[in-house]
Image (cartoon, rainbow, N blue to C red):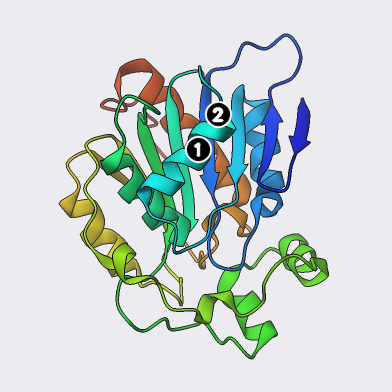
């Protein structure tokens, strides 16, 4: 498994000899940068997916997001091509998928811990770093990484969500929504309403999870859930489960 990075993109490839099973384009949220998703990128790459984490700003519109995705993925990305976003990146992924055409193609969206679409952003606590860490993640490893990261912008959760991202986005592709039921930034009820409005949506609720779903203490479970959903997407557009568990 190899990783390469540039100021705008961090990329993780599957191990040598493993044929890629798809392409993921990760859109960070407020305060974040591509390498914040190194752990997620390495895990999904190990499962056979090419992962590009792309530097986008919350104010970047669909055209700019898609252009950055195209530049990162190259001219012939392995399908399915999926936008994965966290916080404002989740909203950007939904909007960009709705605006995408044939170049680049978007086959699905993973929207994790979407930023609030209301004006208020509870739990932001821009001047209180410890409170922001608590709102973001319960994972001690990720908390330490963010605390030591000079590139990460503290207080980002207190920044307003751009007006354009508060509008409804309804991409015509399968969507996996991941949300913590203890998220202090965006209430779970907002994710539930979004899932009910999308025609091809699955909602995964992380019990006890907070805002940064992909980097929370349950990151292994959420990464595994993403892999299972991706395999469904590869098989039949995520319409049917590949495996069903019964019993206790």
Rendered image: mark on residue 69: 1
Residue 168 in view of the camera: yes
Q: Residue furthest right?
A: 148
Total labels: the figure holds 2
Q: Is residue 178 visible?
A: no
Q: Residue drawn at (76%, 34%), measured in percent from left and top? A: 4
Left/right of residue 81 with respect to residue 147 in the rendered view: left
Task: Assess disc 1: are there few (<14), some (14-19) or many (≥20) residues with their C-alpha within 10 Å of its C-alpha.
Answer: many
Query: Would you place residue 107 above or below residue 27 in this image?
Result: above
Identity of the residue furthest to the bottom in this view: 127
* Quadrant occupied by the C terminus: top left
Q: Nearer the viewer, residue 244 or 110?
A: 110
- Comparing 104 with 195, the one in front is 104
Q: Dot 1 lies on which element?
A: helix
**Image position, residue 24 (x, y; %):** 52, 33
The percent coordinates of residue 78 (x first, y second) are 51, 18
Q: Residue at x 45, y 47 (%)?
A: 65
Residue 180, above or below 185: above
Q: Position of residue 107 (x, y in %)?
A: 35, 28
Residue at 65%, 75% in the rendered image: 133
User: Dot 2 surroundings within 10 Å: few (below 14), some, or many (20 or more)?
Assistant: many
Question: In this rendering, would 11 be left or right of 54?
Answer: right
Q: Residue at x 60, y 59 (%)?
A: 216
Residue 225, position as x, y percentages in the image: 48, 39
Give the residue at mark 2: 73
Contact between marks 1 and 2 (CB within 8 A): the answer is: yes
Quadrant of residue 163 in the image? Answer: bottom left
Side of 190 where 25 appears, left or right: right
**Residue 218 location, quadrant:** bottom right
> Please, what secondary structure does the residue beneath circle 2 have?
helix
Question: Distance from label 1 to label 2 (Cα)?
Answer: 6 Å
């Amino acid at each position: 498994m190899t990783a390469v990075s540039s100021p705008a993109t961090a990329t993780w490839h599957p191990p040598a000899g493993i044929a890629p099973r798809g392409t993921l384009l990760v859109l960070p949220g407020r305060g974040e940068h591509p390498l914040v998703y190194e752990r997620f990128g390495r895990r999904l790459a190990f499962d056979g997916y090419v992962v590009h984490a792309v530097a986008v700003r919350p104010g970047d519109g669909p055209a700019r997001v898609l252009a950055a995705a195209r530049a990162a993925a190259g001219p012939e990305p392995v399908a399915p091509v999926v936008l994965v976003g966290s916080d404002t990146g989740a909203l950007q992924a939904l909007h960009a998928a709705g605006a995408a055409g044939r170049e680049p193609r978007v086959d699905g969206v993973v929207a994790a811990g979407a930023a609030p679409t209301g004006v208020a952003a509870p739990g932001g606590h821009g001047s209180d770093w410890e409170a922001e860490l608590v709102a973001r993640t319960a994972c001690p490893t990720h908390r330490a990484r963010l605390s030591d990261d000079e590139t990460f912008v503290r207080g980002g959760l207190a920044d307003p969500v751009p007006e354009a991202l508060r509008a409804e986005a309804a991409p015509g592709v399968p969507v996996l929504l991941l949300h913590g039921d203890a998220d202090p930034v965006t209430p779970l009820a907002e994710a539930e309403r979004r899932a009910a409005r999308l025609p091809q949506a699955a909602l995964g609720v992380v019990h006890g999870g907070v805002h940064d779903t992909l980097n929370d203490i349950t990151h292994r479970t959420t990464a595994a859930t993403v892999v299972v959903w991706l395999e469904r997407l590869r098989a039949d557009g995520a319409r049917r489960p590949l495996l069903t568990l019964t019993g206790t």
